[in-house]
Amino acid sequence: MRDVLRQLATCLPGHRVLVVGDVCLDEYLIGRPERLSREAPVPVLAFQRREVVPGAAANPARNIHALGSTASLVGVIGDDPAGEELRCSLTAAGIDTSGLLVDPHRPTSVKTRVVADAELRVMQQLVRIDRGTRAPLAPPLQAALLAAVERLIPSVDVVLVSDYRAGVLTAETIAALAALAAQHQVPLAVDSQGDLWRFRGYTLVRSNRPDAEATLQRPLLTDEDFARATAELREALGAQALVITRGAAGIAARGPQGFAAFPAANRSEVFDAVGAGDTVIAVLALALAAGSDVLPAAQLANVAAGIVVRRFGNAVTTVAELLAALEGAQRTD
């Protein structure tokens, strides 16, 4: 199986991916903890630096670029400094932003994390502040977003839909994306949140365990639970492949070749799980473009997630790192 995964890793570069979904700017305010406040039992941080990185649907686009493929992003930002900063960050990361629309009436989504950075210790997030709106897009903007998809979809190998429930992916848009992908015979992968029944007709559906449990209205605990859940969801959604991420318990996947559950590739060096799901869906979408079955794709995505959780914040990985991780895993077998 290692040879299969190594071969698949080398097939990830060279694809063209259209990413559609909710985008945001991830902002990190990083300081050195000095003392406890006299005003409240909270640490006082001496400010060190501010960092920004594209987040939400923009993060799988960054992963796709890091893995050697090209990504075009369709989403919505506001006519504000955060939106311009996000656009510049995406351009610097090599992402095509020609499909990024500006709505002067809608603020750019920003997630601000206050982080303590102590010497010889792992950075720790103290609090997160979210700014933005979850209101559905206005009909004219929804039409403009779909027009951008129609313009870009003829030149791509796969469409990746990233749902952060921030208003871009309305029921009408979700259905229209499925119709456009079918019309152009392009596989359609979704990184879903919330009710999975909205994504009927999608080629590959990825969910995390809590959302799958909420959709099915029952707990998922054992491998047998996940085997039944993936079979039920795959059939009901009409999907080719169904993937459920299980946190520290790994990943479960079902496709035409059957079901498999893989343990987490890394459980001992988890510094930050933020963005790991974005890495998973990026690998799955690229593997779909390469014609891979979902079972080896899910196993490789599991390895990729094990790499990025070793890093703080939204992180990406490369094919070289995947190959090195597979080589290291082989040596410890």
Image: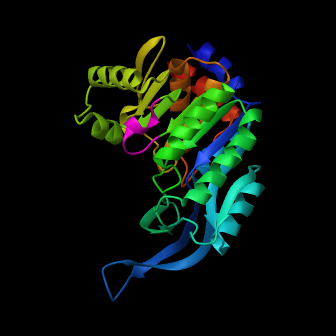
Foreground: 181 or 258? 181
Residue 298 position within the rendered picture, expressed as x and y whole percent measured from the top left? 51, 26
7 above or below 38?
Answer: above
131 above or below 241?
Answer: below
Task: Judge whether residue 315 can be spotted in this image.
Answer: no
Q: Is residue 84 magenta?
A: no
Answer with left or right where residue 94 lies relative to residue 199: right
Q: Quadrant of the N terminus?
A: top right
Quarter holding residue 254: top left
Foreground: 220 or 274? 220
Answer with left or right where residue 199 lies relative to residue 292: left
Residue 194 position within the rendered picture, expressed as x and y whole percent measured from the top left? 38, 45
At x 41%, y 27%, the residue is 237
At x 77%, y 49%, the residue is 94
At x 41%, y 18%, the residue is 260
The colour scheme used to paint the residues is rainbow
258 above or below 264?
Answer: above
Number of numbered discs on residues: 0
Answer with left or right where residue 161 lies relative to residue 157: left
The boundaries of the magenta stretch are 192-200
Residue 331 position within the rendered picture, expressed as x and y whole percent measured from the top left? 56, 21
Answer with left or right where residue 28 lies relative to residue 269: right
Task: Judge whether residue 69 can be spotted in this image.
Answer: yes
Foreground: 142 or 323? 142
Q: Is residue 199 magenta?
A: yes
